[in-house]
Image (cartoon, rainbow, N blue to C red):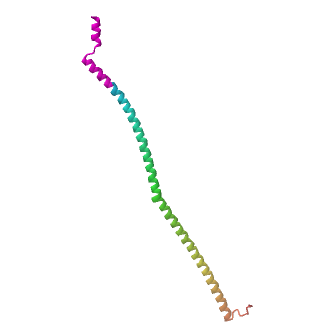
């Protein structure tokens, strides 16, 4: 009788089998959920790193474009304007020098003409040695 009773106790009923299967399934799902969470976290970190690298690369591309399309033409334009202003300043200095020299030469010529006219009138009538 005891053997039969032990056999009956060891033999699981249909509900116990279903319950045991459900328990195993839940435990397996729990393991899968943990693995999925770990894999998802790893994937998110990888995608975040890739996204930040892509963002950094795009910022570098934009900076290079701005340098090539905006800053460099402005620098060239400023250099051309500087050259034009330097040549204009040099021309103005030459013109000013020319005017000063012209005024001095005109004064010398006027003074010479006055001296000659005074001599010819007789105020300074003496012979100039040549």
Q: Position of residue 80 (x, y in %)?
A: 51, 66
Residue at x-position 38% and y-position 31%: 35
Q: Give the quarter of the figure containing the C terminus.
A: bottom right
| Vertical placement of residue 36 versus 14, above or below | below
Q: Is residue 97 left or right of residue 52?
A: right
Q: Position of residue 17 (x, y in %)?
A: 27, 19
Residue at x-position 66% and y-position 91%: 116
Residue at x-position 65% and y-position 86%: 111
Specify the quadrant of the image occupied by residue 109: bottom right
Q: Nearer the viewer, residue 65 or 119?
A: 65
Total number of numbered labels? 0
- Magenta stretch, main secondary structure, is helix
Q: Nearer the viewer, residue 67 or 81?
A: 67
Q: Position of residue 110 (x, y in %)?
A: 63, 86
Q: Give the quarter of the figure containing the N terminus.
A: top left
Q: Position of residue 96 (x, y in %)?
A: 58, 76
| Vertical placement of residue 63 versus 129, above or below | above
Residue at x-position 60% and y-position 76%: 97
Outermost residue on the top side: it is 1
The part of the chain drawn in magenta is: 1-26
Outermost residue on the right side: it is 129
Q: Is residue 78 left or right of residue 5?
A: right
Q: Is residue 99 left or right of residue 115?
A: left
Q: Is residue 91 magenta?
A: no
Outermost residue on the left side: it is 14
């Amino acid at each position: 009788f005891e053997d039969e009773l032990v056999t009956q106790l060891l033999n699981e009923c249909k509900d116990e089998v279903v319950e045991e299967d459900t328990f195993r399934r839940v435990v397996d799902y729990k393991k899968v959920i943990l693995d999925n969470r770990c894999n998802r976290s790893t994937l998110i970190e990888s995608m975040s790193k890739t996204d930040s690298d892509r963002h950094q690369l795009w910022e570098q591309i934009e900076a290079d474009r701005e340098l090539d399309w905006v800053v460099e033409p402005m620098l060239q334009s400023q250099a051309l304007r500087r050259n034009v202003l330097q040549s204009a300043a040099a021309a103005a200095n030459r013109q000013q020098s020319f005017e000063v020299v012209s005024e001095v030469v005109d004064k010398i010529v006027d003074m010479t003409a006055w001296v000659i006219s005074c001599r010819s009138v007789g105020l300074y009538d003496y012979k100039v040695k040549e």
